[in-house]
Amino acid sequence: MNAIEIHPMRSNREQRIFLQFPWRIYRGDPLWVPPLIPERRKVINPQQGAFFKRGEAEFFIAWRDGKPVGTICCAEDHVTNQQRGTSDCMIGFFECVNDEAVARAMFQYAINWAKHRQLKALFGPFNLDYEDSYGVLIEGYDQPPALLCGHNPPYYRSFFENFGFSPARGKNLAYAVKLIDTPALQRLSRLANWVRRNRNIQVRGSDLQHWDDEIDKVHTLLNRALRHLPDFIPWQREALLASLEPFKDIADPELVLFAEVEGQAVGWFAGIPNLNEAFIHANGLRYPWNYVSLLWYMRRQPQCLAVKSVLVLPEYWERGVSILLFDELAKRAMAKGYRWADLSLTSDDNPYTPALAEKMGAEIYKRYQVYRYWI
């Protein structure tokens, strides 16, 4: 068997190969949600991608016998490394045929890339976005992932762990909760009604007419509510804006909730339609007729509401804000026809959010792992 060669992506042809390589890995996998090629092309474009405002990245293709057998991205996030006092090389866009030799060759190439830049560890996988396709799926292969969650073959885990990668933090959990009148939601409603009567907390939907003001509130909540987490990465406002902007036109403002005390935002709980229910039929928009399929499925009522974050200021953790937000969102979502909610992702080393999810009767249905390899 010929040697494995790894080369940087340079030409338009190589970019097409890089972006379309996952179709080789997931052919015949009914759970895979193909990434939208036009959006992914923007993400890796230094002139358009939000990541390139704070770092640099290169993209590589592994070849054997003249055929692509793997892809990987190596990136240096200057801003995050400086803020955290780390020297990490972010890796991502990892896709590989079922051959450990190919994975090892790509990991070794990433190590050499990192050493050349005096970086101390490989960290990931992340696709140039700490919230998109987070980590390696290690449990939960019985249903497709929800929006922003990843999917990969089971053998990816062994590739990372056999090479010597260690868990970078606790496992990241995706919860599912049925939006029906269950005993758990009834108990939650009773608690929420007590909070409504005894606490001066108001819940409102978002005001998309004042988008910048709402982003400012979320930015403040995000960095104050999550800074207690291990390895927390402070959010830059530009990165937050780039992350939320794609959902501005599809979000239902009645399902993007703020909790306020005397006009001050103390909590945020956002539910957005699980667009993966449509994207799974769109073939990544590789061909013009795929847009027709996407439009058709986008008109259908999603079954799942994707909930990506619950943010509550630490001084309000024990005052019922989260219970009130959970209850309000569940009631509004059920009234609109949603059947279940995806609550993802939260880490098992952050017991606060899992405890809230379990109060709703939620159950873990997927687990993901982020890894680090010290050089």
Image (tube, helix red, strand yellow):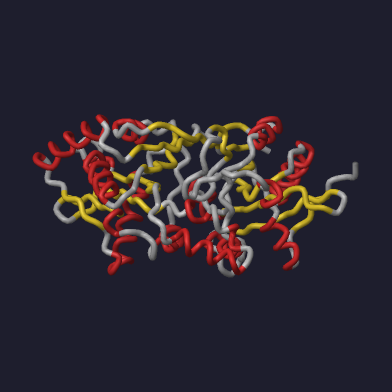
Q: Is residue 189 left or right of residue 97?
A: left
Residue 124 visible to the viewer:
no
Q: Is residue 277 left or right of residue 211?
A: right
x and y percentages locating residue 135 in the rendered image: 56, 41
Q: Nearer the viewer, residue 107 or 133?
A: 133
In this picture, is 219 found above or below 107?
A: below
x and y percentages locating residue 95 in the rendered image: 68, 47
Quadrant in which the C terminus is drawn: top right
Q: Nearer the viewer, residue 147 or 70?
A: 147
Q: Nearer the viewer, residue 41 or 168?
A: 41
Q: Residue at x 14, y 53 (%)?
A: 262
In this picture, is 324 found above or below 220?
A: above
User: Which of the 4 quarters of the picture holds residue 240?
Assistant: bottom left
Quadrant in which the N terminus is drawn: top right
x and y percentages locating residue 259 in the rendered image: 22, 50
Residue 35 visible to the viewer:
yes
Q: Residue at x 61, y 53 (%)?
A: 76
Q: Residue at x 57, y 59 (%)?
A: 36
Q: Residue at x 79, y 38 (%)?
A: 101
In this picture, is 180 found above or below 306?
A: above
Residue with the most extreme left position: 197
